[in-house]
Amino acid sequence: MHVLLNVVDGMSKQLIKQLIENRVSEDGMVETGVKGVKLFRITHSVRCAPAVYEPSVVVIVSGAKEAILDGKRYVYDNRQYMCCSMSMPVEAGTPRASPDNPLLGVMISLDTKVMTELAIAMESAIGVIKSQGGSVPPGFALAHWDEAFTDALWRLLQLVGRPVDTSILGDTRLRELYYAVLKGEAGNSVRRAFGVGNEIARVIEYLSSHLDKSINIEDMASQVGMSRAVLHRKFKQATTMSPIQFVKSMRLNTAAMKIAGGMNVNTAAMDVGYVSSSQFSREFKRMYGKSPKQWTHAQQLVAGMA
């Protein structure tokens, strides 16, 4: 029976890969018609660069993707999907992608309202959260495909190119996929972010929308009624970083993304809460090993070679 399930799972993955190959003929993202669900293809190597992962699931069916979180490197391919249940500052890239080995996959944004409804319903039904104890799992997790996830993903992607079916069934099948994620290996992380006990996720949401303001640990703790010590401990459990480290990484990564998009260095610095351009430059160089201008020049050279 176990062997049969593996064969079926492998066939479903191959069908998903074929669907993406047929739908995405050039590099970039393609909308599926289901809100928050996109297919993608990348055929050139991209070195890891600052990024901010929003709550999402990224599924790879061909090739491999890399992410660096607080100095630790994660590589995931068609054996594991990535689940980010909170906004996280990372470095991300596709250093192995090439025309002969393209990166193909699906990006699925996690809708806060629907995920919260499902997470709380699960806790109400089976008491999942209460049985997990007090530790907070990482907000960034890798999870092996299981039968429920593979089946739900295939059913969702079968709607691509069928607008009437998508409009009627899209929300339901996306909900099925969310439920499969909640039940899978990343489920504990996701339930803690969206269900009862989601204080750290709420703090991160607050931080993400106030990057241009002065924020200290007392502000963060007051958002969720925690002491400084408890917030610090739980925050580090969830993100691997202290609250202050996290804020700095979010600011610098967001600024780096703005600069890479063509924004002036000083404007990008002010947009993420820096009042001193010299302080911004010092912290940027400490984080990325180059000044903002040196880094921008390096990014332009990489883009020119791609």
Image (cartoon, rainbow, N blue to C red):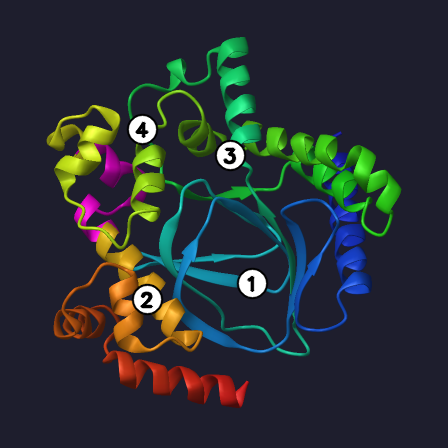
Q: Earlier in the sequence, mark 3 or mark 1?
A: 1
Q: Earlier in the sequence, mark 1 or mark 4?
A: 1
Instruction: Identify the residue under disc 1.
Output: 64
Q: Is residue 245 above or below residue 188?
A: below
Snapshot quadrant of residue 12:
top right
Q: Tell me which secondary structure the magenta stretch mostly adopts.
A: helix
Q: Identify residue type, mark 4.
A: Glu
Q: Position of residue 74 (x, y in %)?
A: 42, 56
Q: Identify residue type, mark 3.
A: Thr
Task: Tell me, yes or no, if residue 70 can be seen here.
Answer: no
Name the secondary structure under disc 1.
Answer: loop
The reply to whether discs 1 and 4 touch (Cβ–Cβ < 8 Å) is: no
Q: Earlier in the sequence, mark 3 or mark 4?
A: 3
What are the residue bounds of the magenta stretch? Answer: 233-246
| Residue ID at (71%, 34%) | 171
Q: Considering the image in quadrants, where does the N terminus appear?
A: top right
Identify the mark at residue 14; answer none if there is no mark: none
Instruction: Identify the residue under disc 3.
Output: 112
Snapshot quadrant of residue 51:
bottom left
Q: Is residue 114 above or below residue 60?
A: above
Q: Position of residue 30 (x, y in %)?
A: 70, 61
Horizontal relation, residue 74 to residue 252: left or right: right
Name the secondary structure under disc 2.
Answer: helix
Name the secondary structure under disc 3.
Answer: helix
